[in-house]
Every structure is written in structure tokens, then in C-alpha cells.
Amino acid sequence: MSEKTKRAGVKQISPIDIYMLLPKTNCKECGEENCMAFATKLVNREVPLDKCTPLLKKEHKKAFKQLWEMLKPLIKEVTIGPEENSVKVGGKYVMYRHEFTYTNPTVIAIDVSDEMSPEEVLERVKKTEEFSYEYIGQTLKLDAVAIRSTSNNPEKFKATVRKVTENSKLPLILCSFEPKILEAGLMASPKARPLLYAATKENWKDMAELALMYNCPLAIFAPNDPNLLRSLSRTLLEYGVKDLVLDPGTFPREGIANTITNFTMIRRAGVKKGDELLGFPLIGTPIVAWTENADSPKEVTEWNEAYLAAILINRYADILILHSTEGWVLLPNTVLRENIYTDPRKPVAVEPGLRTFGKLDENSPVMFTTNFALTYYTVASDIESGGVGAYLLVVDTEGIAVDSAVAGRKLTADKVAEIIKETKIEEKVKHRKLIIPGKAARISGEIEEAAGWDVLVGPRDSSDIPKFLQEKWRPN
């Protein structure tokens, strides 16, 4: 197999290519019915290669290596932090989200510096750890702490690193261009396996020695110079440092065009052209917004940082370092990240079944919705905000919203009848009235016939549910 074929991307690999290298024992140890089914899941990256236990035997070593080369991501996966508290970055297979699922969501790190007071450091670390927001069934969190040396004093940096590691288990990024500074930080956290930021054309050898000595990933910084970035990547790989992260520079305002171009072309080189010297995770630093204009109002600087972060999440950044801890800066970007790092082949869905809200009795209303996550959580929120007790049946529509599910026959009267039977809701209420979404009104008659319940067509917008129940719900 040629090197070009190896690096061509997921679209070039078929299940039969994988199957030919598998043991073909159909042993079912992987949980699949046969080796071809396992090969199909491997192509779709739905199972890990090492799940095939016969493949791990010595006689299949060559085949395992071939399969690993075929299936490995075009952008190398790099782990930051010790195994028990680590984050993974990179591991991408494609340039565009619609081609295949993005893996390993962008890591968002909040900075502290060694010139901050211990109290301020702890406060910022606490805010980073406690940031949490529930969004369509997912808990949005921050991921790491970036410790910057602004004092250029090894002892101050060491003390700050120790303070953070004693009070947090979040993965670390240690930031300085001085190897002696980073070494002091590593001495305070010898097992933390932080990302070292950063190697340059001036300090690369000393940084490489630190990365190898402490088994740490290493970032390369070559602002606005992808050719130098590639050259340093080659040099460090030859020196023995395998886990690299690339920083082509983040430039605000007039430099945004260069920033976008550099991030895009580097990722394109890694994915589309198979350039292994540029096939590494990318790090962006929206924090540079704070160095641009000291006279700007704080809110303006935070806004500049927020939109830089949003641009970089969209332009392939695998790690971001931010300064602001304001919710209005962080929340939109964590939501954006969540929306991008979902499987475009599978709508975000919740488990079908019965949900309950508030105080219930045998006269409580019964409603249904689909298992599309955004629909479900919106409906659930509106029921809760209304303060009413209600049963909510969640119908499996393969993660499709009500109107689309009705049109595509993913929401049918038979499915509604099935969920009524499966949940045994008839044993919980004495009435036989079902409130259906207004957007499902066209199948109301079919539901009555299939389920044997009276149907009340509810509001088209779930925000009107409390008012609807107050005005129109009568169990008898």
C-alpha cells in the first residue's frame, strides 16, 4: 500500500479493505455477529481496533500494524494530563464536519499567571472547575488551566504551579518561552504531563529535552510562518518528540485574515494532502485580545476575545487559551463547540420512555413529544416552568423533531400506541385523554383509532403548555 493511500482519508477505505486484514474467525468476541460487521464499524470509527482480541496475538502483529496505519486519524491524537485526569486533542479524520464526525472537542483553558496573588489564582481555578451549564442533555464544562509566567521568575512560577496542582485536577498548560521557567514548573508537577508551551526556532532543543525527560506533549510557536512551523515539526520529530501541538499565531483585528488562513491551510495540508509534519492539533490564543489595547473597556476586550474564540473553534483549533471567566464570553463558545462536535449522521436524541413532572395523581394530564433532544428539553423546561404535574411520553422518532417526524412517517399513530402500552401509563391515570403536539394535529384521528384514547390537540409552541393546561385540561 502506498503512503498516499495510507493517508488518503476515511472515504478511501472500504469495509472489504479492512476485512481482508482481519483474522476472519467470526468469533464474536468483539460483540459483532461476524468479522465483516466489525470491519464496517471500524470504517465508521464506531469501535476501536483493539476490540478484536484475536488481532492482538503475535501472529497477527503485521496485520494489526497495517490496520492501524489505515485507520489512524490524519491529525494525530495527543493526550494532555495524567491518564486519570487527561484530555485528548486532535484525532481528526476529515476537514469538514459533514464528511465525518469530529472527535475530541476543542479544549478550552483559562489562564492564571505567576504574578497573580494566591487568592486570585485559586479563585480563577475554582471558577474554571465550577463552570457548568446543562444544554440539551449535555453538561458543558471547561477543560484545563493555562499557567503563564509573566514574572520570568522560576521560583514564582514553581510556586504558582504547585498552588494549582494542589487545588485542582484539571490538565495543565505551562506557558513560557524560557526552558528554565518551564523546568521549574515541571519540578512542581512531575507527574502532571502538562502541555509545554512553547518551542520556537531559538529554544527548540532545550524544550525538546524537557518534553522527553518529563514525557510531555510540546507546542511549537511560529507566528504567521507555516513553513517554519513545518520545519520545526520535522526537527522535533527527528529529535524524538512525537506528541506535538502547532501554534501558527492568533492575530486580532487586522490580523484575523492571516489567522484564519494559517489555521485553515495547515489543517488542509494535514487532512487533504496527508502532510504528516502538519498533521497535529492546533492551538489558538484568543487571550491575545487583552494585549492589544490597554485603554479599551473591559467589556470590549472580552467581546474581542469571545469572537476570536468562536472563529478559531470553527477554524479547526483543538485548544484555546482564554482569560475571561465571564459566563457571557464562555457560554456561547461552549454551546458552539457542542453543536460542532456532534455526529452529523445522527440527530441528538434522548432515550424514549415516560418522564414525570411535578406532583402527580390519577387525573394528571398525559402528553407526548419526540425524542429529538432539543424538542424534548424545550418541552420539559416549559412544563417545569409552568409548575404543573404531568406525564410526558417520549416517542422514538430517531431523533427527529415533531413536524419533520410526522412528514417523514417517523412519528406515527402506531408508535404513539406502542409507547402508551410500553410505559403502562393506563395504570397510572384513570382518564384516557392524550394531549398531542399542535404540529402533529394531522394524525390526531389516527392516534385515537390506534391507541383508543381521546386526543386533545395541544399548542404548536410548547411555551403555551401551562396556559393550555390551565384553560382546557379537564380529565373528565
Image (tube, rainbow, N blue to C red):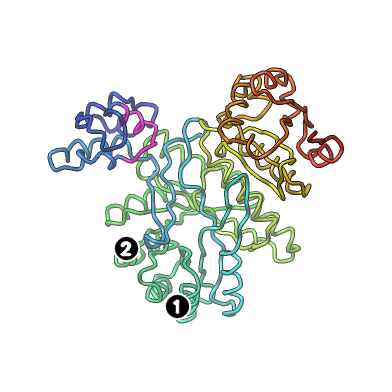
In the foreground, 382 or 273: 382
The residue singled out by tag 2 in the image is 215
**For the residues marked 2 and 1, what is the alpha-carbon distance in whole angstroms?**
18 Å
Whichever of labels 2 and 1 marks the residue nearer the N terminus, that label is 1
Q: Taking 90 as reference, is 123 above or below it? A: below
- Residue 367 within the segment the image draws in magenta: no
Which part of the image, by quadrant, shows the C terminus?
A: top right
Q: Where residue 416 appears, x then y in whole percent?
A: 62, 27
Quadrant of res 446: top right
In the foreground, 380 or 319: 380
Disc 1 is placed on an element classified as: helix
Disc 2 is placed on an element classified as: loop
Where are the magenta residues, as a range?
A: 37-48
**Relative side of 335 to 158, left or right:** right
* Amino acid type at image mark 2: Asn
In the foreground, 217 or 450: 450
**Relative side of 388 to 101, left or right:** right
Q: Where residue 223 appears, x then y in whole percent?
A: 50, 54
* Badge 2 density bin: few <14, some 14–19, many ≥20, Cα 10 Å: some
Q: Residue, x 80% and y 42% (percent of image)? A: 466
Q: Residue, x 38% and y 63% (percent of image)? A: 82
**Relative side of 142 to 204, left or right:** right
Which part of the image, by quadrant, shows the N terminus?
A: top left
The residue singled out by tag 1 in the image is 158
